[in-house]
Image (tube, grey):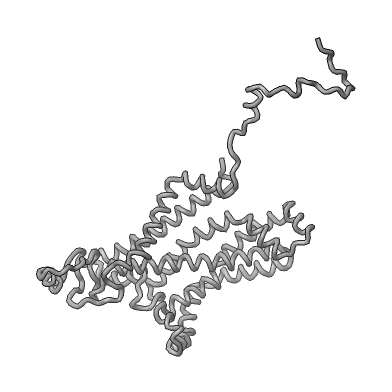
Amino acid sequence: MTDKKKPLSFQLDVSDFLPAEQEEKQSLVVMRKSVSFWKDGLRRFSRNTIAMISLVAIILIMIFAFVVPYFYPYSYEQQIRGSENLAPMQYSQQELELKENGESVFPHILGTDSLGRDTMIRLMMGSRVSLLVGIVASILVLLIGSTYGAIAGYFGGKVDLIMMRLVDIIYTVPDILIIILLMVTLKYPLQELAYSSPAFEWINTVGVGLICIFIVFALLYWVGMARIVRSQILSLKEQEFVTAARALGASHGRIIRKHLLTNCMGTLIVTTTLQIPSSIFTESFLSFIGIGVAAPMPSLGSMASTAIDGIVSYPYRLLAPAIMISLIILSFNLIGDGLRDAFDPKLKN
């Protein structure tokens, strides 16, 4: 028998150095591999079937809007004589004669409009315009709103009071009225600028109305983002890691950029994603009432507006852009809901 170890003795116990048994090993096994915030959020987002279907739909729409037009035989401004008001998959008399002579003629899948322009290619370009407007407007809202809200929330006090009162004032400004005023004010100066230099010819292609829409997005539509970011910063700036950064001598700009906004990234992504359908709907509505892209550049809203006159005879002209607008907005909304469910810590369980 071995002597028992005395309580106050410095003698080592040999049993402490024996190999661990299988049960002891199992008790130390980590049940689940630790993952980062982003990996965990993306994993839960990928398990959301509706959000993934919506993501696939958006990818297909982007291919339809940005890739297919390069291979399509018609252009959005091309007017084909004798092909006015054709029904879907219908050929004009001239095209039928060409087919009889053995030539290949690509069909008008969605027919043509009153000017003989192919409706399908105009639907592609209209979808491209709407997507670009939604994405660019959301980026503007993200940059301006996050910066403004972060500064107001970080400094607090009188700075926060003054900045948020400006936000309350901007909330009261009617956006459509500002767009109309900007169009009246900027129409002739922008047109003169477009004709004065070849570098500004894109102004005539895009149109004064669409430029004014972007200006209004940058002036008015960031206030919601600013309020969301401010509320996040107010709670985060009292955390220990911010205090540690101040103690290490980090500047205010670095703390806001590297520590606070980084920890708001999940909220920023969700809010930006949900801003895209709102911007697309606004642009489509303004184009529908005649404030938007310049002709002949199509937009989903302008296509729906021109189709109203022939809704009884040619209902498919209205259905095509209306279905596309609904599909784009619904898909982005479902993606935003999926991102919110994936990156919201309160919904983690």
Where does the image place residue 131, in percent across and percent down from the top left? 42, 65
9 relative position to 45: left or right: right
Whether residue 187 can be seen here: no
Seen from the viewer's position, the closer of residues 3 and 144 is 3
Whether residue 195 can be seen here: yes
Where does the image place residue 80, in percent across and percent down from the top left? 22, 76
Seen from the viewer's position, the closer of residues 257 and 292 is 257
121 relative position to 174: left or right: left
In the rendered image, the vertical position of residue 341 relative to residue 283, given as above or below: above
Image point (68%, 54%), residue name: 236
Quarter of the picture holding the C terminus: top right
Q: Which quadrant of the figure has residue 300?
A: bottom left
Quarter of the picture holding the N terminus: top right
In the rendered image, the vertical position of residue 43 relative to residue 257, given as above or below: above
Q: Residue furthest top?
A: 1
Where does the image place residue 277, in percent across and percent down from the top left? 45, 61
Q: Which quadrant of the figure has residue 172?
A: bottom right
Seen from the viewer's position, the closer of residues 331 and 52 is 52
275 relative position to 289: left or right: right
Q: Residue furthest right?
A: 8
